[in-house]
Amino acid sequence: MRIKVSSSILSADFGRLNEEIATVEKYSDYIHVDVMDGHFVPNITIGACVVWGIKTRLPLDVHLMIDNPEKYLEEFKEAGAKILTVHFEACKNLKEVLKRIKELGMKAGVSIKPKTNVEVLKPILPYADWVLVMSVEPGFGGQQFMESSLEKIKWLRKNAPKLDIAVDGGINEKTAKLCAKAGANVLVAGSYIFKSQNRKKTIESLR
């Protein structure tokens, strides 16, 4: 299975966001956008109004780390999201949220925090196109990779062989290999890419 890279703008210079995206666009498969509300996670980033302003030919992979995500699905669709990921922990009726995301014409993703047992996702796997395994506590970039995420990836690949399995947090050349071996096919990386002096070479090292 081909490894795809989603470059996370959380570690980019927000004052020159589209310039930063342009430096990785040729070498990435997706642009990953973290939306945080200061409630579901202890940090605030951007909303749909900023997503509207992102200029890229790549699909926007938007990760909603927010409470009540079902209220904002249409807004992020209009802003340009192609993949929309919500959290298991934030949804009262996850199945219906995923179905609605698909109805809106986006790929439906679900994410789980590091302390959440991956097996809670078993009933909804048929409704998801994409599962995002958090390998750090969500909210801030630059954290250390949690190896416990590897067992979650293995379980997902066993139970959903054709699913896109993404992993986010502490991804670098070393941890990318571990994740790919476990069964992940999408690697989300932020600080490793945007703090690099040679972003092309850095992205290539993840594949």
Image: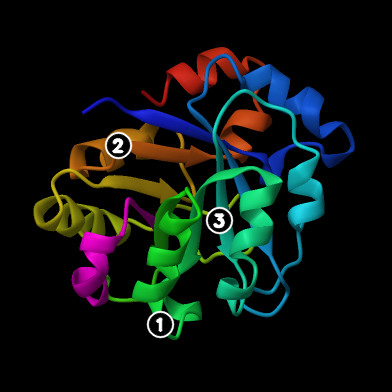
Residue 101's spot in the image, x, y percent? 47, 59
Describe the element under mark 2 as helix, strand or loop: loop
From mark 3 to mark 2, how far is it between C-alphas? 17 Å
Q: Is the residue marked by circle 3 packed among few (<14), some (14-19), or many (20+) residues within 10 Å?
A: many
> Residue 125: within the magenta?
yes
Identify the residue shown where x is 29% and y is 33%: 177
Looking at the picture, which amino acid does disc 2 mark?
Asn
Q: The C terminus lies in which quarter of the figure?
A: top left
Looking at the picture, which amino acid does disc 1 mark?
Asn
From mark 1 to mark 3, how far is it between C-alphas? 18 Å
Up the image or down, 71 lies above or below 185; here it is: below
* 14 with respect to 201 (left or right): right
Comparing 23 with 68, the one in front is 68
> Residue 126: within the magenta?
yes
Q: Which mark is residue 63?
A: 3
Q: Which residue is mark 2?
A: 185
Q: Which residue is mark 1?
A: 93
CB within 8 Å, label 3 to label 2: no
Of marks 1 and 3, which one's residue comes earlier in the chain?
A: 3
Residue 107's spot in the image, x, y percent? 42, 48
Q: Is the residue marked by circle 2 packed among few (<14), some (14-19), or many (20+) residues within 10 Å?
A: many
Looking at the picture, which amino acid does disc 3 mark?
His
Of marks 3 and 2, which one's residue comes earlier in the chain?
A: 3
Extreme residue in the left direction: 158
Describe the element under mark 1 as helix, strand or loop: loop
Numbered range of the magenta stretch: 119-133
Identify the residue shown where x is 56% and y is 73%: 70
Does residue 15 appear in this view? yes
Describe the element under mark 3 as helix, strand or loop: strand
From mark 1 to mark 2, how far is it between C-alphas? 27 Å
Of marks 1 and 2, which one's residue comes earlier in the chain?
A: 1
